[in-house]
Amino acid sequence: MTKYSQTVEDGIDGMREMARGNFNLSWMDSNPEGWGQEVTRSQDGLRLENIEKGHYAKVPEFGSSHGSMAPRGCYVPDETPGLDQYTLNEMSEVWSENAAALYDEAVVRQWNSVTDIPWDKLEKLPDDIEKSVCQMCTGLTEVEFVAGDMPAQWLHRINHDFHEVKLFLATQIMDEARHLDVFRKRALANGGGLLSASPANQDLLGAILTAGDYTTASALMHIFGEGFVLTLFRQGEFLAPTEVEKTIFRMCMQDEARHVAYGVKHLQYLLERHPEREEEIHKVLDLGEQAIFSLTIEPQTSEPRAILAGGGMDNIELGLARMAFIYQKQVKEYINRLKVAGLDRLPRITIPLEIPDLGLAA
Ligand SMILES: [Fe+2]
Ligand SMILES: [Fe+2]
């Protein structure tokens, strides 16, 4: 007869006991506090916030010290080994009161670039317009996935007790994959292709990825970077020559609104508990603002947007005026979002609130 290891032999003995009707069944009564949960479903279905009630809503300020992957609210046997993987164990470092609701919204509103974009509406465009769309899409393809890389970089470090945040960040990674893919598809789909990368982009993207802690990275990305992108997409009608780009901007905008909403509420949660972190956040925003300004003046970023906003190279004056309007909106909304989060940026801002007079009328 084959000789198995002790572990396997013990397992077979256990099965023999069960076959004789000798069960352990201690798990059945292991978690009395967590038993008998009453759930009321939302009108549209079962939301996370419907189940995270009472016993299950108790999120520890410091994530479980056992450091295992035991689900929050279950009974954890003493012998459960810790995994020694989590470094973000303080709730305020990652928490946002809207994470659960944003997760549910994200899973309900998933879309895809295969069938949800009216690709059949693509039409032959004048050369300057097609080239501008392709250059804008090259730039957006370049930046979009940093917002997937950044949460991916921190996700496995976040304590398992904060699963609402982990779930939300997982949806963000998928959202950004879709954004990368939809802008790349648009660049390649209409007889054009990718044009030039942007050296200035790398400063901002690099600062997000090398930020020393999660909250700093989040402020720079969720509020600053994605906030600027959200405002840009909201003005998408100026930059979209066909129904295709309009739909792309509209779809991406819904996703970006969730990412920004998480960032604002997270920063607010952190600053209410750690006001001493304010200065550090200001410093990273100093960097971000300078980086975005170098980006704005790079020809491969500014020119295609101005051409699209004006409706062609001949109308560059109108295009520049519209881009100046969008910039002003971007800065204003950025300052407002930080204000909601509890940070007064206006006295510290390092970039102009509006584009100075370019002498266009002269
Ligand atoms: Fe995105
Ligand atoms: Fe995003």
Image (cartoon, grey):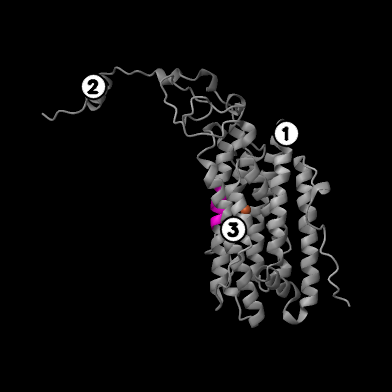
Element marked by disc 2: helix
User: Crowding at label 3, few (<14), some or many (≥20) Cα neighbours within 10 Å?
Assistant: many
Label 2, on which residue? Answer: 13
Q: Establish whether ligand 1 lies closer than 8 Å to the Cβ of label 3.
A: yes
Q: Label 1, label 3: how many angstroms apart (C-alpha)?
A: 31 Å
- The residue type indicated by label 3 comes to Glu
Label 3, on which residue? Answer: 144
User: Crowding at label 1, few (<14), some or many (≥20) Cα neighbours within 10 Å?
Assistant: few
User: Is-magenta flag for residue 21?
Assistant: no
Element marked by disc 1: helix
Q: Report the number of discs.
A: 3
Residue 43 appearing in the image: no
* Earlier sequence position, callout 1 versus callout 2: 2
Q: Label 2, label 3: how many angstroms apart (C-alpha)?
A: 55 Å
Residue at 61% in and 81% down: 124
* Earlier sequence position, callout 1 versus callout 3: 3
Q: Nearer the viewer, mark 1 or mark 2?
A: 1
